[in-house]
Amino acid sequence: MGTILIVYSSRVNETKGIAELIAEGARQTGHQVQIKTAEEINTEKDLAGFDAYVFGSPTYHGDMLPSMKQVLFMAERAQLKGKPGGAFGAYGWSGEANKRIFDTMNYICKMKMASGPLMVKASWVEDGVETAQAYGKEIAEMI
């Protein structure tokens, strides 16, 4: 079994809640998961050695939080080409951060991405729990 790294930034812990649900889904497949905040990632070496990556940030004023941008800059240098990946984040209106993170991982880092970014506004909305857990399973099955 592999190990999945989930890195998130959060303002009011909604993105953290989604990260935890994704981790639950991945763990249900037998994989190990580490969850870290974007602030815990200081160099590209902090991203080394994992089998899959999931990055998330809330959308705030149409963009991701600056700490997630820094993670993506490090990911670009961390040799993640071909690794499975996914993107997520809480949002109120349109979820631009989710899409931008996903596209950066796909087109810049050249990762093997999930079917799309996870578009769940919050963990408690409608089928948020099931959808986030299914996303974790999808990424785990890509390993």
Image (tube, helix red, strand yellow):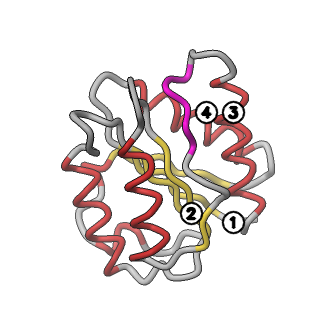
Residue 117 x, y percent position in the rendering = 55, 49
Disc nearer the start of the sequence (3/2) = 2
Name the residue rendered at 25%, 34% in the picture.
Answer: 60
Between the C-alphas of marks 4 and 2, the distance is 16 Å
The amino acid type of the residue labelled 4 equals Leu
Judged by depth in the image, the label closer to the viewer, 4 or 2, is 2
The amino acid type of the residue labelled 2 equals Gly
Disc nearer the start of the sequence (3/1) = 1
Q: Which residues are magenta?
A: 118-123
Residue 10 x, y percent position in the rendering = 32, 34
* Dot 1 alpha-carbon crowd within 10 angstroms: few under 14, some 14 to 19, many 20 or more: few
Name the residue rendered at 31%, 22% in the picture.
Answer: 12
Residue 24 x, y percent position in the rendering = 67, 37
Q: Which residue is mark 2?
A: 85
Disc nearer the start of the sequence (4/3) = 4
Residue at the far front in the pictured view: 94
Disc nearer the start of the sequence (4/2) = 4
- In the image, residue 20 sits, relative to residue 51, either above or below, namely above
Q: Which residue is mark 1?
A: 2
Q: Is residue 21 left or right of residue 80?
A: right
Between the C-alphas of marks 3 and 2, the distance is 16 Å
* Quadrant of the snapshot with the N terminus: bottom right
The amino acid type of the residue labelled 1 equals Gly
Name the residue rendered at 60%, 51% in the picture.
Answer: 33
Secondary element under disc 2, as helix, strand or loop, is strand
* Dot 3 alpha-carbon crowd within 10 angstroms: few under 14, some 14 to 19, many 20 or more: some
Secondary element under disc 4, as helix, strand or loop, is helix
- In the image, residue 59 sits, relative to residue 110, either above or below, namely above
